[in-house]
């Protein structure tokens, strides 16, 4: 299944609070409406808006990111966050719109990602290699 693109929406709310929880490897976004979302670092990493991940229009499947964490969260102007992951990945700016779309669609994005991994014979666990037997 091809990844569904995340389209920009000019009406996207901007978070009123952003909290990095290193122990649980999550980023919490809180909005004025009272909405609160907990985004796992793994989800953020495998859906990074960087060219390395998005592949210039042809997304590159990220795998082995089960234990990835966030080491730093920095503002990028008034419109985005720059996230630094403990696997060294730090490219791509997460705009407010992109983060909000990841948050509200995280369940379906995660299900699609797990399907892509299975189809490719890859694993979330960096120490695990999946072997498919042809019988």
Image (cartoon, grey):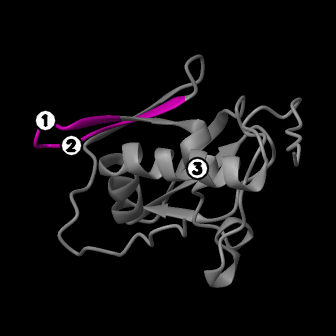
Residue extending furthest toward the left: 33
Residue 14, above or below 124: below
Seen at 57% across and 56% down, the residue is 47
Q: Residue 31 carries which label?
A: 2
CA distance separating discs 2 and 1: 5 Å
Q: Residue under circle 3?
A: 115
Question: Where residue 103 sits: x, y (%)?
Answer: 35, 47
Tell me if I can see residue 78 in this picture.
no
The CA span between labels 2 and 3 is: 30 Å
Q: Between residues 100 and 95, which one lies in front from this camera angle?
A: 100
Q: Is residue 30 in the magenta section? A: yes
23 shown above or below 51: above
Residue 125, how many percent across, how many down?
Answer: 78, 31
Give yes or no for contact between labels 2 and 1 (Cβ–Cβ under 8 Å): yes
Residue 23: mark: none
Q: Position of residue 118 (x, y in %)?
A: 68, 47
User: How many C-alpha atoms fall within 10 Å of the one at disc 3: few (<14), some, or many (≥20)?
Assistant: few
Q: What stretch is highlighted in magenta?
A: 26-37
Q: Is mark 1 on a helix, strand or loop?
A: loop
Mark whose residue sits in front, 1 or 3: 3
Question: What residue would you read off at disc 1?
Answer: 34
Mark sitting earlier along the chain (2/3): 2
At x 75%, y 55%, the residue is 120
Give the side of residue 114 with respect to residue 19, left or right: right
In front: mark 2 or mark 3? Answer: 3
Q: Quadrant of the N terminus?
A: bottom right
């Amino acid at each position: 299944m091809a990844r569904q693109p995340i389209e920009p929406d000019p009406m996207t709310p901007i978070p009123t609070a952003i909290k990095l929880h290193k122990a649980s490897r999550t980023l919490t976004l809180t909005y004025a409406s009272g909405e609160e979302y907990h985004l796992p670092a793994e989800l953020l990493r495998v859906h990074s808006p960087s060219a390395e991940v998005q592949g210039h229009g042809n997304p590159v499947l990220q795998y082995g990111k089960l234990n990835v964490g966030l080491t730093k969260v920095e503002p990028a102007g008034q419109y985005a966050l720059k996230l630094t992951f403990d696997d060294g990945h730090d490219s791509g700016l997460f705009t407010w719109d992109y983060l909000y779309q990841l948050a509200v669609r995280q369940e379906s994005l995660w299900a699609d990602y797990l399907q892509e991994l299975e189809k490719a014979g890859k694993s979330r666990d960096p120490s695990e290699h999946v072997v498919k037997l042809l019988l």
